[in-house]
Image (cartoon, grey):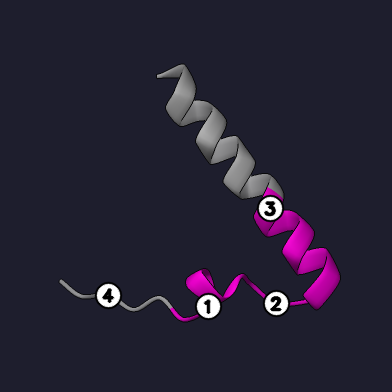
Amino acid sequence: AAAVRQRMADVRTRHHAWIREHGTDLPEVADWTWTG
């Protein structure tokens, strides 16, 4: 579980940095749509 936890922390860090630089969500978040 430690690897998954680290991956999630890395994604949150990347997302936070993107928001601070661009003022919007990451494209993969902003463009996500429900497929189910």
Which region is colored magenta? 14-31
What numbered label is drawn on residue 30?
A: 1
Q: Residues within 10 Å of mark 2 (few under 14, many from 20)?
A: few
What numbered label is drawn on residue 22?
A: none
* Amino acid type of the residue tagged 2 in the rendering: Thr
Local secondary structure at mark 1: helix
Q: Which residue is mark 2?
A: 24
Tags 2 and 1 in contact by the CB under 8 Å rule?
yes
* Amino acid type of the residue tagged 4 in the rendering: Trp
Q: Residue at x 20, y 75 (%)?
A: 35
Inter-mark Cα distance, 3 to 2: 13 Å
Q: Quadrant of the N terminus?
A: top left
Q: Which residue is mark 3?
A: 14
First in sequence: mark 3 or mark 2? 3
Inter-mark Cα distance, 1 to 4: 12 Å
The answer to whether residue 13 is left or right of residue 3 is: right
Inter-mark Cα distance, 2 to 1: 8 Å
Q: Which residue is mark 4?
A: 34
Tags 4 and 3 in contact by the CB under 8 Å rule?
no
Q: Residue at x 66, y 58 (%)?
A: 15
Q: Residue at x 79, y 76 (%)?
A: 22
Looking at the image, the residue that sits furthest to the left is 36
Local secondary structure at mark 2: loop
First in sequence: mark 2 or mark 4? 2
Residue 6 in picture, x, y percent from top left:
55, 29
* Amino acid type of the residue tagged 3 in the rendering: Arg
Q: Residues within 10 Å of mark 4 (few under 14, many from 20)?
A: few
Tags 3 and 2 in contact by the CB under 8 Å rule?
no
